Amino acid sequence: MSKNLIFPEGYSSPLSFRDTQRAIKLVKDTFQGKLADALNLERVTAPIIVTKKSGINDDLNGVERKVTFTTKEVPGTAEVVQSLAKWKRMALKNYGYDYGEGIYTDMNAIRRDDDCDNLHSIFVDQWDWEKIITRQQRNVEYLKETVSKIVGVLYDVNEEIKKQYPVLKTEICKDVFFITTQELEDMYPDLTPKQRENKITEKYRTVFLMQIGGILKSGIKHDGRASDYDDWSLNGDILVWNDVLKCAYEVSSMGIRVDAESLHRQLTICGETEREQYPYHQGILTDTLPLTIGGGIGQSRLCMLFLGKAHIGEVQASIWPPEQREEFAKHNIFFL
């Protein structure tokens, strides 16, 4: 049994199974429309499998094992996507989008090495979005402006959901507190990265934690990031305080994507310059792919937050360790 499991004292779901399913649909329908309006995005269809040789599957922290298989007619190895960070950027070019325009899609993935706990599942569902920007917009100010728009959508959708289901009590703070991982380490040097996140998010309710991926002064990373999609100096996580679980709750990982200079630098740091041969990486190094900003926003994560749930299994049909399902049932937490 995982040591990270949380059993909120006195918990019971505020919604029945049937109302939960209705509310999930309401959350998803409402959020994606408002997000598209706020960021000028259009919905597109995206793959769940890609070829290994394409190099466009997301490597996440660089250590996760992908789900791979071969097929009857397609040569080589196929991979189930882990996210679509690279694919989206290529799609923007191939589909003819221009500056200020973007796309979003329903991204369904398998992350076989993810933990199974209150917040994590091996099945991942999120809205992946990407938008073309100019060279002049590759700065912290534009990143913060985009984050504030997304948080505004979170706030508005939460208020709409509560109007439909008054029993729900989730509160979202519209005012974002921006801080870098190094500033956070300087503030709480004796805490672990996760403890720092909890401390700052409990205080400010909504936090954008910036500059994730590089080595801090302590000699460790706050968290891992793949070397070839986010620019580590221009990325971050949106964290909100979860009143049910009493912890910092990540709803989005996002950032301004690498350009030629930052891609080469980060690949060099990670000892991964051999990736520069892939078509995706060549597109960045030769400036044939557009400069972009993008991210992923967890669908089940948002449903869990807005609907006051204690476990992601209450809003998502997946597979779980049998003993975990049984243990949560003892604490009045029942999975779909």
Image: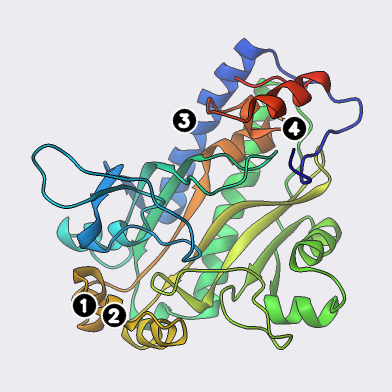
Residue at label 2? 274
Amino acid type for the residue under numbered disc 1: Gln
Pointers 2 and 4 in contact (C-beta within 8 Å):
no
Return the x and y of residue 74 as percentages of the image width and height. 11, 44
Badge 4, how many Cα within 10 Å: few under 14, some, many 20+? Answer: many
Q: Which mark is residue 288?
A: none
Residue at label 1? 277
Mark 3–mark 1 distance (CA, rounded to whole Å): 40 Å
Of discs 2 and 3, which sits in the foreground? 2
The mark nearer the N terminus, 3 or 1, is 3
Amino acid type for the residue under numbered disc 2: Glu
Residue at label 4? 310
Q: As drawn, which residue projects farthest toward the right?
A: 9
Pointers 2 and 1 in contact (C-beta within 8 Å):
yes
The mark nearer the N terminus, 2 or 3, is 3
Q: Secondary structure at mark 1?
A: helix
Mark 2–mark 3 distance (CA, rounded to whole Å): 42 Å
Q: Quadrant of residue 157?
A: top right
Instruction: Classify residue 154 as left or right of residue 84.
Output: right
Badge 2, how many Cα within 10 Å: few under 14, some, many 20+? Answer: few
Q: Secondary structure at mark 3?
A: helix
Residue at label 3? 29
